[in-house]
Amino acid sequence: MIETSTPKTNSLQKTEVNKDINAEDLSEDEQSFYSSIKPCLNAMVTDPKQETISKLVNYSRSV
């Protein structure tokens, strides 16, 4: 079997951790956009598609 590795020169350097974005940090247009998609995003979290549930269950069975 062939051993493979990634040279350190191609490794990603750890950068500063992104801070949580507050509503005050967003422009008016960004706040408007987020407000328009927020209900859809919340619906995806609270009511996932059956296909998503099936994929998660199948994955957890394979582990």
Image (tube, rainbow, N blue to C red):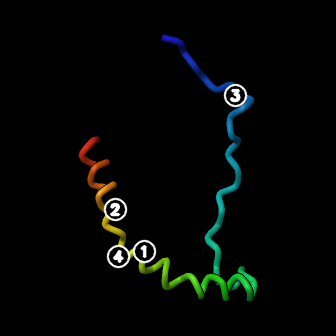
Q: Earlier in the sequence, mark 3 or mark 2?
A: 3
Q: Is residue 24 above or below residue 2?
A: below
Say left or right for 43 vs 9.
left
Mark 3: amino acid: Lys
Marker disc for residue 47: 4
Residue at disc 4, secondary structure: loop
Dot 1 corresponds to which residue?
44
Q: Which disc is residue 7 wearing?
A: none
Badge 2 marks a residue whose secondary structure is: helix
Callout 4 amino acid: Asp
For residue 63, side relative to residue 44 (left or right): left
Q: CA distance from mark 3 to mark 2?
A: 39 Å
Question: Which quadrant of the figure has residue 29?
Answer: bottom right
> Residue at the spot x=74%, y=88% of the render?
28
Tell me how far mark 4 sits from mark 2, CA to CA.
12 Å
**Which residue lies under the disc numbered 3?**
8
Which residue is denoted by mark 2 in the rendering? 51
Nearer the viewer's eye, disc 4 or disc 2?
Answer: 2
Up-down: is 34 above or below 61?
below
Distance of label 3 from label 4 (alpha carbons): 43 Å
Residue 19 lies, in percent from the top left, at: 64, 67
Q: Is residue 15 left or right of residue 4?
A: right
The outermost residue toward the left is 61
Count residues near mark 4 (Cα–Cα under 10 Å), then give few for <14, some for 14-19, many for 20+. Answer: few
Could you tell me the amino acid type at mark 2? Glu
Q: 60 or 24, which is in the foreground?
A: 60
Q: Amino acid at mark 1?
A: Met
- Looking at the rendered image, the disc whose residue lies closer to the viewer, 3 or 1, is 1
Residue at x 67% of width, y 45% of height: 14
* Disc nearest the viewer among 3 and 4: 4
Residue furthest front as drawn: 51
